[in-house]
């Protein structure tokens, strides 16, 4: 067996790697076989991280060609891909190209990623559209009132603007301030990154932003682009420079590292790092898996996975992946408790934030030893909101009769049939105050701050990862690899020999077996939402930006396209 492995891995075949973003990027593998077939040619982020790292040391690999176009991923994901390309470029040549960086549309994330390569090309008929970011604020109260819906929400405090989307008549100063700073931070980080990678002055990049869209000639003049050319010209030039042939091309996710076969017979000696995910809105119970298209993170499942870590003596550290806008305060607190228990066992926990880890998502992460976020991650939002849509007027407008009979003084407090009474508002305010005080007190404790200092960063305000790091809400700016390395370092392990193991990944047969007790790992339960007018309204609210599921929810979604 050893002789076969040596013979197979000693071949001197030249390889030219390709990363084609037009085919898509996946952060999570689909569990549904049909969905998996639909994204067969997409690049999985986990494979991309591992293969680029191994390819950088592979003498067969001549370089990397990146087709740097938009791929419907948040800016934080594009940021991590760019960092992986830049790291690979420290060892091998890299080239990025695109037909256009935006066509009558902004393409700042894709262009920022392209500048991670040594050389940047654009088609002669294309554009370089890097015109900054537009952050939109939508208030829906007027529309809701027209159809007979009365929004009633309480919040803690002024920056928790999910409530404003439905209950405010005008954009508040706090809302405008927060959204302006979010946009500024995202663009400032992108401009600084582009300037550093291209070796030009920041002012020159800002010139490109403010004069966008740029012609290819202007982009070359500013030093943003190296050459113009079509795909065939890019490839013929690159292959000629690197001594390659078309047959040498391999997608990064189809590349077989020289060490991949050896891994089959080599046992890891560096210890194990467990990877546990918190993905989607946070709910109590078991949540729903990604295969349903409505993935949510159930506190029962996250706790189940972290309890499995406690039982596994081989696990020496944990990476907690958080990509969640928040949700249930109770579920978020349960997750934090589970993280603390792992830390108390002597195993360090490093939270790795994805595109968003805010409100309840921040709550779940804040108990970790360290937090890693991308510069474009949306995080913070340490605040609370709760309320309801009173739909009685809507029912009356369409000729429906509805009457609620209540037994008990607080029965139907959150019912959509009637408005809050003064006593209801008092109870709601009492709950909001309690949740907010608990959230801020524990956040201050976890982050080693005084409560007053933490409070100044809370009030429901959302921060980019860059600003959160400057304010002490996160520890490091980086991606998954940095989180893994920090977990290893804290546990006294060598990242080069440590093994990452996803606790949530069950084999096909394991997933079919029934759990024997609450200590068993099993697949999440499927929960079908109620089919009613109120449920449809809640779904519409979620589409507008208010996630269903609890008091700790992110107030908005920001996309740069």
Image (tube, rainbow, N blue to C red):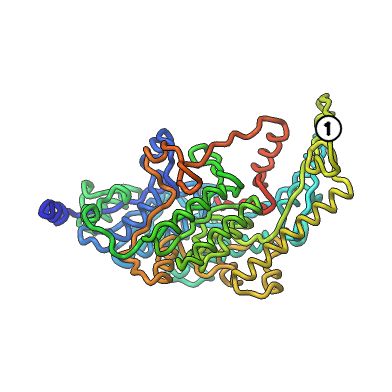
Residue 395 x/y as whole percent: 81, 29
Q: Is residue 202 left or right of residue 444?
A: left
Side of 6 where 530 appears, left or right: right
Q: Residue at x 52, y 59 (%)?
A: 353
Picture quadrant where residue 287 is located = top right
Residue at image point 66% right, 54% down: 329
Nearer to me, 307 or 414 = 307
Please state which of residues 370 and 377 is positioned toward the viewer in this rendering.
370
Q: Residue at the location (58% across, 59% down)?
A: 336
> Is any part of residue 124 visible from this angle?
yes
Give the x, y percent position of residue 388.
77, 44
Seen as rendered, the residue at the extreme right is 422
Q: Is residue 207 visible?
A: no
Q: x%, y% of residue 481?
A: 40, 62
- Seen in the picture, residue 124 relative to 471 is either above or below; the reply is above
Count of numbered labels shown in the rendering? 1
Q: Image height check: is 415 above or below 491?
A: above
Please name the residue that numbered disc 1 is placed on. Answer: 404
131, above or below 473, in the image = above
In the displayed structure image, the side of residue 422 where residue 275 appears, left or right: left
Left or right position of 310 against 440: left
Q: Nearer the viewer, residue 56 or 312?
A: 312
* The residue positioned farthest toward the top in the image shown: 399
Q: For the residue labelled by badge 1, is the local secondary structure a helix, a strand or a loop?
A: loop
């Amino acid at each position: 067996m050893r002789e076969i492995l040596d013979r197979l891995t000693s071949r001197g075949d030249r390889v030219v790697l390709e990363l084609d973003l037009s085919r898509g990027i996946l952060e999570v593998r689909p569990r549904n076989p049909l969905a998996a077939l639909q994204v067969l040619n997409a690049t999985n982020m986990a494979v991309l991280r591992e293969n680029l790292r191994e390819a950088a040391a592979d003498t067969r690999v001549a370089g990397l060609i990146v087709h740097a176009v938009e791929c419907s991923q948040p800016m934080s994901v594009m940021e991590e891909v760019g960092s992986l390309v830049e790291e690979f470029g420290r060892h091998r040549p890299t080239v990025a190209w695109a037909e256009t960086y935006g066509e009558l549309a902004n393409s700042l994330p894709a262009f920022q990623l392209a500048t991670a390569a040594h050389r940047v090309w654009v088609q002669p008929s294309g554009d370089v559209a890097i015109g900054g970011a537009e952050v939109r604020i939508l208030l829906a109260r007027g529309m809701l009132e027209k159809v007979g819906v009365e929004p009633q929400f309480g919040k803690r405090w002024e920056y928790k603007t999910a409530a404003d989307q439905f209950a405010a008549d005008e954009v508040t100063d706090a809302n405008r301030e927060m959204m302006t700073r979010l946009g500024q931070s995202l663009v400032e980080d992108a401009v600084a990154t582009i300037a550093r990678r291209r070796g030009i002055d920041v002012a020159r990049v800002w010139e490109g932003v403010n004069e966008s869209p740029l012609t290819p000639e202007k982009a070359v003049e500013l030093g943003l682009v190296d050459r113009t050319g079509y795909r065939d010209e890019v490839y013929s030039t690159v292959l000629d420079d690197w001594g390659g042939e078309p047959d040498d091309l391999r997608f990064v996710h189809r590349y077989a590292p020289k060490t991949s076969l050896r891994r089959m017979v080599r046992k890891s000696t560096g210890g194990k790092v467990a990877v546990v995910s918190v993905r989607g809105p946070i709910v109590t119970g078991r949540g729903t898996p990604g295969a349903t298209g409505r993935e949510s993170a159930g506190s029962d499942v996250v706790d189940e996975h972290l309890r499995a870590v406690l039982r596994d003596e081989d696990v020496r550290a944990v990476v907690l992946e958080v990509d969640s806008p928040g949700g249930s305060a109770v579920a978020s607190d349960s997750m934090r408790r589970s993280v603390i228990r792992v830390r108390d066992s002597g195993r360090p926990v490093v939270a790795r934030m994805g595109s968003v880890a805010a409100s309840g998502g921040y709550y779940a992460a804040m108990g970790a030893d360290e937090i890693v976020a991308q510069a474009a991650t949306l995080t913070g939002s340490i605040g609370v909101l709760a309320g309801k849509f009173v739909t009685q007027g809507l029912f009356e407008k369409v000729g429906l009769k509805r009457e609620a009979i209540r037994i008990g003084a607080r029965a139907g407090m959150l019912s959509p049939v009637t408005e809050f009474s003064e006593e209801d508002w008092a109870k709601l305010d009492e709950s909001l105050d309690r949740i907010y005080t608990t959230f801020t007190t524990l956040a201050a404790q976890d982050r080693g701050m005084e409560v007053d200092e933490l409070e100044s960063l809370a009030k429901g305000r959302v921060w980019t990862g860059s600003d959160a790091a400057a304010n002490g809400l996160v520890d490091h700016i980086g991606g998954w690899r940095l989180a893994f390395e920090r977990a290893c370092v804290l546990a006294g392990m060598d990242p080069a020999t440590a093994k990452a193991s996803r606790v949530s990944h069950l084999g096909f047969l394991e997933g079919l077996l029934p759990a024997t007790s609450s200590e068993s790992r099993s697949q999440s339960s499927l929960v079908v939402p109620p089919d009613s007018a109120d449920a449809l309204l809640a779904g519409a609210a979620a589409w507008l930006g208010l996630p269903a599921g609890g008091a700790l929810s992110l107030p908005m979604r920001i996309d740069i396209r």
